[in-house]
Image (spheres, rainbow, N blue to C red):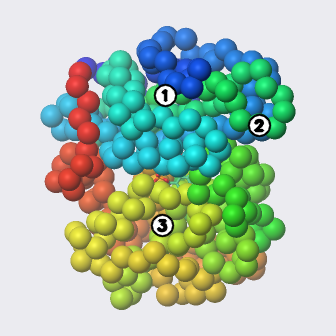
Amino acid sequence: MTVNLDWENLGFSYMKLPYRYLATYKDGQWQEGVLTEDATLHISESSPSLHYGQQAFEGLKAYRTKDGSIQLFRPDENAKRLQRTADRLLMPQVPTDMFVEACKQVVAANHEFVPPYGTGGTLYLRPLLIGVGDIIGVKPADEYIFTIFAMPVGNYFKGGLQPTNFLIQDEYDRAAPNGTGAAKVGGNYAASLLPGKKAKTSGFSDVIYLDPATHTKIEEVGSANFFGITADNEFITPISPSILPSITKYSLLYLAENRLGMKAIEGDVLVDELGKFTEAGACGTAAVISPIGGVQHGDDFHVFYSETEVGPVTRKLYDELTGIQFGDEEAPEGWIVKVDL
Ligand code: PLP
Ligand code: COI
């Protein structure tokens, strides 16, 4: 059973659901997490997450299948990425079992908000790990909060499988060559707000960032990874230490090779060689697969497949990925985790 919402037109907006998970880390260990109806965090004004950005987040989704059951897509991979991010920012790791169990609890407690099968909607989960407590020097916190809240969402980019245009701005980077680009920390997104606003004000969906050292290679979109398809049946996605290791991207690399018989490559994507791609897209949990119509770079506007039509390979990848996520296609071992209601 679900509540009554306009499931087909959700967009990507915050909605306060009845329950969220909350656990605290004190005296060197995680305390038992609880589900709470309190959607407000009560933390010290001097918390290192507020001043020095000692925080991390994740994003994953729960999907309603045709038979009405609910499932998560590769939550263990989000747990592992949060652990790598935690290591980078000297925060305690959230164990994988605790992370996945917390996701299941939040989904089960809010199950009426998981959109019905066939509406295209999903329940987006936002795990958040923050350093808290009375510390003012630049050093790691002694105490942490790990919380997961959720909300039903639809398309992140306008139109979903509808192509949209993206902007490359040489004057901005989202991350430094040896910085925190590969970690899912708020600071990367803070750095992307101004360039993102400029892009959106000019009618683009988002920014495509170049590698911060040479500005010759495509790195990723502000909120998703980049992929391109070549006429030689290759699926190519950038390799770089300063982009977020996208779980969707790694899933697509696997599916392109093993289900679509393509050559799947993580390699350099030179911004001067966009002509070799017959199709391109942005991929991520929120973005799913969003076709990239064209890219503006200085005076050059490059169209990949079409500004209005989704390319055939992008569509096949989309169908395969979402087919697995919604339970219509057989999933590779371990990709799907059922939620008990
Ligand atoms: N790159 C950035 C900057 C992101 O914010 C996201 C979203 O999580 C991704 C890539 C895609 O990662 P994933 O597929 O794990 O959601
Ligand atoms: C996600 O896809 O989960 C993201 O984190 C992207 C964006 C909403 C920041």
Q: Are marks 3 and 1 in contact (CB under 8 Å)?
A: no
Give the residue displayed 47% in from the left and 57% down from the top.
Answer: 246
Query: Mark 3, residues whose alpha carbon is within 10 Å: few (<14), some, or many (≥20)?
Result: many
Where does residue 12 sit, x and y in percent of width and height?
A: 52, 39
Instruction: Tell me the element at label 1.
Output: strand
Mark closer to the observer (2, 3): 2
Identify whether 268 is placed above or below 101: below
Q: Please give the residue where the numbered disc 3 appears in the rendered image.
A: 281
Q: In the visual, does 176 lie left or right of 69?
A: right
Q: Earlier in the sequence, mark 1 or mark 2?
A: 2
Q: In the visual, does 206 lie left or right of 146?
A: right
Q: Please give the residue where the numbered disc 2 appears in the rendered image.
A: 139
Q: Earlier in the sequence, mark 2 or mark 3?
A: 2
Ligand 2 under 8 Å from disc 1 Cβ: no
Q: Are marks 2 and 3 in contact (CB under 8 Å)?
A: no
Where does residue 141 sit, x and y in percent of width and height?
A: 70, 30
Q: Please give the residue where the numbered disc 1 appears in the rendered image.
A: 148
Q: Is residue 11 visible?
A: no
Where does residue 21 sit, x and y in percent of width and height?
A: 46, 21
Q: Amino acid at mark 2?
A: Lys
Mark closer to the observer (1, 2): 2
Real-space Cα separation, disc 3 to disc 1, in angstroms: 29 Å
Query: Mark 2, residues whose alpha carbon is within 10 Å: few (<14), some, or many (≥20)?
Result: few
Real-space Cα separation, disc 1 to disc 2, in angstroms: 25 Å
Q: Amino acid at mark 1?
A: Ile
Q: Amino acid at mark 3?
A: Gly
